[in-house]
């Protein structure tokens, strides 16, 4: 008795050209497509969004921090970690409600456009 529940077929689905196409091949193709779509839309390093970092920097920091501050002879940050500490310190000093991800976005924006430090390990 099957109680109205369809049983799985032992037949392999046929592709449009008539050749058997196993379920795992279609599943793998779908999985690869989905992963490629996510990879194409993924932001920069470790999830940081440089575009959002630029918008945050331009709206909250650039008023005081003109591009000259990042090209002065005695650069204060010597590593990407120091840039992160400085951005977070200013975030607290001027009471910005940024999330840790937004701080990381600004850090990545500054690193990509100004400092060009090597990726952190």
Image: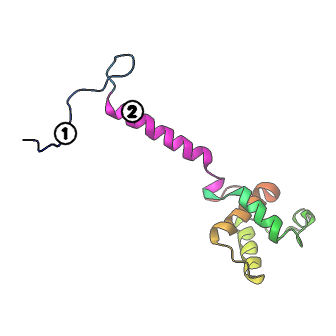
Residue 57's spot in the image, x, y percent? 79, 66
Q: Residue at x 75, y 68 (%)?
A: 83
Depth order, front residue of 38/84: 38
Residue 12's spot in the image, x, y percent? 27, 26
Depth order, front residue of 2/36: 2
Asked whether residue 36 is drawn in magenta, I would say: yes
Residue behind mark 2: 26
Is residue 78 visible in the rendered image? The answer is no
Is 90 situated above or below 110?
below
Q: Point out which mark residue 34 bears.
A: none
Q: Point out which mark residue 6 bears.
A: 1
Q: Quadrant of the C terminus?
A: bottom right
Residue 95's spot in the image, x, y percent? 74, 82
- Specify start and end residues of the magenta stretch as a single range: 22-46
Q: Residue at x 73, y 64 (%)?
A: 106
Asked whether residue 47 is drawn in magenta, I would say: no
Is residue 9 visible in the rendered image? The answer is yes
Q: Residue at x 37, y 31 (%)?
A: 25
Please rate how many residues cluster around mark 2, counting C-alpha atoms within 10 Å: few if below 14, some from 14 to 19, many from 20: few
The kind of secondary structure element at disc 2 is helix
Q: Residue at x 34, y 18 (%)?
A: 19
**In the image: residue 98, left or right of residue 37:** right
Is 71 situated above or below 33?
below
**In the image: residue 54, left or right of residue 32:** right
- Quadrant of residue 89 within the rendered picture: bottom right
Residue 64's spot in the image, x, y percent? 89, 73
- Quadrant of residue 56 within the rendered picture: bottom right
Closer to the camera: disc 2 or disc 1? 1
User: Which secondary structure is most common in the magenta stretch?
Assistant: helix
Q: Quadrant of the N terminus?
A: top left
Is 69 situated above or below 94?
above
User: Given the current orientation, which residue lies at the most extreme left position?
Assistant: 1
């Amino acid at each position: 008795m099957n109680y109205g529940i369809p049983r799985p077929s032992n037949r392999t689905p046929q592709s449009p050209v008539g050749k058997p196409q196993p379920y795992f091949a279609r599943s793998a193709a779908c999985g690869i497509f989905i992963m490629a779509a996510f990879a194409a839309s993924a932001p920069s390093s470790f999830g940081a969004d440089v575009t959002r970092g630029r918008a945050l920097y331009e709206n909250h920091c650039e008023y005081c921090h003109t591009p000259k501050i990042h090209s002065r002879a005695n650069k204060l940050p010597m590593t990407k970690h120091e840039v992160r500490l400085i951005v977070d310190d200013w975030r607290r000093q001027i009471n910005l409600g940024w999330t840790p991800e937004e701080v990381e976005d600004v850090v990545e924006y500054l690193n990509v456009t100004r400092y060009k430090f090597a990726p952190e390990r």
